[in-house]
Image: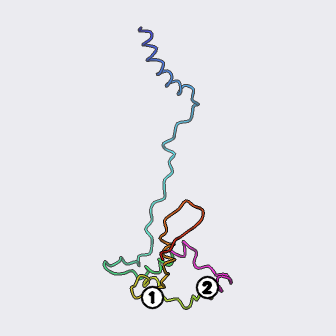
Amino acid sequence: MSKALTALILMPALALGGCALFAPKTAPLDEFAVARNAPLVIPPDYTLTPPVAGTISSTAEGAQTQAIEALFGGPSPRSQTETSLLQEAGRDRAALGARSVAGDPDTRVVDKGNQTRAILSAPESQSTEATANPPQ
């Protein structure tokens, strides 16, 4: 019993310690071979003034424009086809604030009729054919 107990204790210790016995010998790290960083230097330009609390920066819009151009590369030239399509669509006749007045009650909208309402409110179906029964 004592031999079995001794073997149970020594076998894991030898197995774990054996890994270090068969590992290749490497040179230890040299703690004195550390490269030093260059010291921090204060920039020579002292003409900057600290921002005043409660004021708006004059360069905020310029910085935003620079960021957009850096991200998206600025406006790209339009092709002749795209230019003619936009011209035919009436790009120059569009209202400037169209998106902000889209939900306005005074905005004129076209009544789509019962047929379109029935198609838009039709329930989903597993059929491959589309059908809609408009109210009469």
In this picture the colour scheme is rainbow
What label sits on residue 20 in the rendered view?
none
Specify whether 100 is left or right of 30: left
Q: Nearer the viewer, mark 2 or mark 1?
A: 1
| 29 up-or-down from 63: above or below | above
List x then y, in percent, for residue 54. Answer: 31, 79
User: Is the stretch drawn in magenta largely helix, strand or loop?
Assistant: helix
- Range shown magenta: 67-87
Q: Residues within 10 Å of mark 1 (few under 14, many from 20)?
A: few
Q: Nearer the viewer, residue 103 or 59?
A: 103
Using residue 15 as the reference point, say whether residue 86 is left or right of it: right
Question: CB under 8 Å between callouts 2 and 1?
Answer: no
* Towards the viewer: 43 or 63: 63
Residue 33 at x, y = what percent?
51, 45
Q: How many marks?
A: 2
Whether residue 112 is in magenta: the answer is no
Q: Amino acid at mark 2?
A: Leu
The residue pinned by badge 2 equals 86
Of labels 2 and 1, earlier in sequence is 2
Indicate whether 97 appears above or below 133: below
For disc 1, the marked residue is 108
x then y, percent, for residue 135: 47, 75
Identity of the residue drawn at 57% across and 26% down: 22
Q: Nearer the viewer, residue 110 or 29?
A: 110
* Residue at the extreme bottom of the image, as rendered: 93
Q: Nearer the viewer, residue 69 or 47?
A: 69
Disc 1 secondary structure class: loop
Residue 20 x/y as whole percent: 53, 27
Q: Residue at x 44, y 9 (%)?
A: 3
**At 40% from the left edge and 88% from the top edge, which residue is drawn?**
106
Marks 2 and 1, Cα distance to the nearest angstrom? Answer: 23 Å
